[in-house]
């Protein structure tokens, strides 16, 4: 289980972004984090992943405190992070990118598990291909699998549907939900695509002005739902 308590900080142009964020994520569940642009979604993801200094509060993953640890230690303790824009190594092959996911994990073997190739079959088909020559959807599948081979207990996905065709979005959503259930993985996704949220998540948290202000079961969300109009409409 992951717990964040009164997480504050993440300064942008002198202004505080996060303001007392408190949330709990259970094993085997997918939770969506939604809100308008500039409300603190990506800042919160970066804070959890250890990429932001000057954060206050508490963040614990299975009783291990993550606060004030560098990003590589946060990863070693079980946090996988797929940032917005994917951040793959374009000149590396697909296989070399996946191997980056196990580096810095002393307890993991230096070989890739079979499921790294079968979960998203396109990665096996393009094993030797330079990652930068693949489509956006294929690169997103690669970035997600690179995080998964590190055997995280918490997976952070920032806008996984951005720039991807609908069929691949659907495949990614179904795969993540299945893996979360099978491996007891907690997933937090930042997402604006309601279709993907409904396909992938069970619960939705709404963030406004750097604080979690509401939540709902995903089944209750549709384009004209009051919460959607309140927190997502321009």
Image (spheres, rainbow, N blue to C red):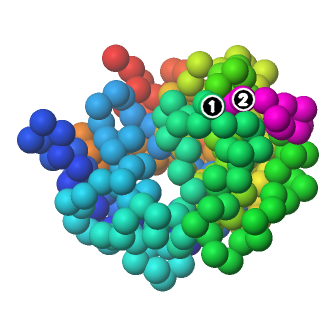
Vertical side of 67 occupied by 134: above or below? above
Distance from disc 2 to disc 1, alpha carbons, whole Å, reads 6 Å
Q: Position of residue 221 (x, y in %)?
A: 57, 33
The answer to which quarter of the image holds residue 29 is bottom right
Q: Is residue 124 visible to the viewer in this orientation of the structure?
A: yes
Query: Which numbered tag is attached to residue 130?
Result: 2
Q: Is residue 174 magenta?
A: no
Q: Which residues, given as a range, are shown in magenta?
A: 121-131
Q: Is residue 20 visible to the viewer in this orientation of the structure?
A: no
Mark 1 Cα shell of 10 Å, populated few (<14), some (14-19), many (≥20): few
Q: Nearer the viewer, residue 47 or 125?
A: 125
Q: Which mark is first along the chain, 1 or 2?
A: 1
Q: Position of residue 230 (x, y in %)?
A: 36, 29
The residue that mark 1 highlights is 91
The kind of secondary structure element at disc 1 is loop
Q: Is residue 130 magenta?
A: yes
Q: Quadrant of the C terminus?
A: top left
């Amino acid at each position: 289980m992951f717990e964040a308590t009164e997480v504050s900080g993440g300064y942008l142009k002198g202004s505080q972004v996060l303001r007392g964020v408190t949330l709990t994520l259970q094993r085997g569940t997918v939770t969506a984090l939604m809100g308008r642009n500039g409300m603190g979604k990506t800042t919160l993801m970066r804070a959890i992943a250890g990429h932001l200094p000057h954060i206050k509060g508490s963040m614990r993953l299975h009783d291990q405190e993550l606060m004030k640890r560098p990003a590589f230690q946060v990863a070693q303790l079980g946090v996988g992070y797929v940032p917005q824009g994917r951040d793959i190594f374009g000149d590396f092959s697909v296989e070399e990118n996946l191997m980056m996911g196990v580096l810095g994990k002393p307890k993991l073997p230096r070989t890739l598990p079979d499921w790294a190739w079968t979960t998203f079959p396109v990665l096996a088909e393009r094993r030797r291909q330079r990652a930068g020559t693949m489509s956006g959807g294929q690169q997103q599948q690669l970035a997600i699998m690179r995080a998964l081979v590190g055997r995280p207990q918490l997976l952070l996905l920032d806008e996984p549907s951005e720039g991807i065709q609908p069929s691949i979005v659907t495949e990614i959503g179904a795969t993540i939900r299945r893996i979360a259930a099978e491996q007891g993985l907690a997933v937090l996704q930042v997402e604006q695509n309601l279709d993907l949220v409904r396909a992938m998540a069970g619960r939705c948290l709404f963030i406004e002005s750097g604080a979690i202000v509401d939540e709902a079961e995903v089944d209750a969300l549709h384009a004209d739902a009051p919460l959607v109009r309140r927190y997502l409409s321009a």
